[in-house]
Amino acid sequence: MEGDSEHLIARSIREEAETRALALPDISNFEAIKGHGIQADIDGHKVYVGGPQLLTHLAIDLPKSLVAVNPRGRW
């Protein structure tokens, strides 16, 4: 998904993928969600990549099994 991102880390990921000659899926509808992460379509599925702020932005509650791992909610 990092293929269209302007982020510095994304650029490094792309360069390493090229170095390793990895086969990458086709990505469409890439969008950076400022301050939260990215989203794109991969094989007909909407995929999001980001941190806890992205979950809040998307109004997604963590499953209890994950909350139990980090009960204070600090990442």
Image (tube, rainbow, N blue to C red):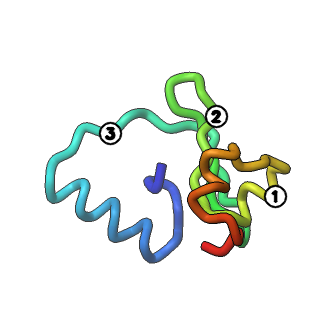
Q: Earlier in the sequence, mark 2 or mark 1?
A: 2
Which label is found at residue 57? Answer: 1
- Front tag of 2 and 1: 1
**Residue type for callout 1:** His
Which residue is at 80% across, 59% downward?
Answer: 56
Q: CA distance from mark 3 to mark 1?
A: 28 Å
Secondary structure, mark 2, is strand
Number of residues whose C-alpha sits closer than 10 Å to that of mark 2, classed few (under 14), some (14–19) or many (20 or more): few
Residue 45 position by quadrant: top right
**Residue type for callout 2:** Lys
Which label is found at residue 34? Answer: none
Which label is found at residue 24? Answer: 3
Image coordinates for residue 9, horizontal then vertical, percent: 42, 73
Q: Is residue 5 above or below residue 63?
A: below
Q: Label 2 belongs to which residue?
A: 46
Number of residues whose C-alpha sits closer than 10 Å to that of mark 3, classed few (under 14), some (14–19) or many (20 or more): few
